[in-house]
Image (cartoon, helix red, strand yellow):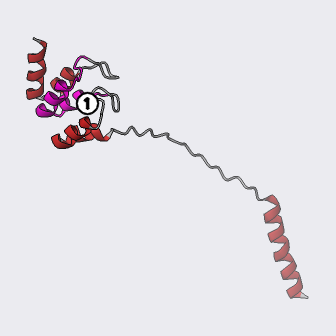
Amino acid sequence: MKKSVVIIAIALGFSFTTIHATNDIVTSSTYETVTKRAVNPFCISIVKGDLDTVKKLIELGQDVNKKSNGLTPAMYAAKYNRLDILKLLVEKGAKLNVKSVKGMTAAKYAELSNAKDTLAYIKELDS
């Protein structure tokens, strides 16, 4: 009889606990949207200074004024001081006075990056 009373007491204890239990699990989550902007292979070749690849892509019909991630190929060449590539781009019709999405030209990118060779070349063309 004592065992029965103890078992019933334990069972009632569990049942009262589960009756009054609430499922108040608070989950707060924030989602952050990440936008990846990819630079096209043509501009990556310019940044790396790979003149042969740049020449080949131009031969295959790559537009020398097409923006990638808001910058023209000439802006990449100016920014990374790739003088030989910038000369090739200009020879193939690249426009140096086009503005980026931030409102800057190739000359401004060269100036901000302290790319003295490409900045001197651009100033030479402007005069």
Q: Is residue 66 left or right of residue 94?
A: right
Residue in view at x 19 percent, y 28 percent: 89
Q: What kind of residue is marked 1?
A: Pro
- Is the residue 105 above or below the residue 77 in the image? above
From this viewpoint, which residue is outermost toward the right?
Answer: 1
Residue 7 lies within the magenta run: no
Residue underneath mark 1: 73
In terms of depth relative to the viewer, which is nearer, 51 or 97?
51
Q: Is residue 71 left or right of residue 30?
A: left
Find residue 113 and report its horizontal and vertical position in percent. Answer: 17, 29
Considering the numbered disc 1 on the image, is that residue within a helix, a strand or a loop? Answer: helix
In terms of depth relative to the viewer, which is nearer, 71 or 102?
71
Find residue 91 and report its horizontal and vertical position in percent. Answer: 16, 25
Residue in view at x 26 percent, y 41 percent: 44
Residue 56 placement: quadrant: top left
Residue in view at x 55 percent, y 42 percent: 30
Q: Is residue 91 left or right of residue 26?
A: left
The stretch of residues the image draws in magenta is: 71-97
Residue 116 placement: quadrant: top left
Find residue 13 and report its horizontal and vertical position in percent. Answer: 81, 70
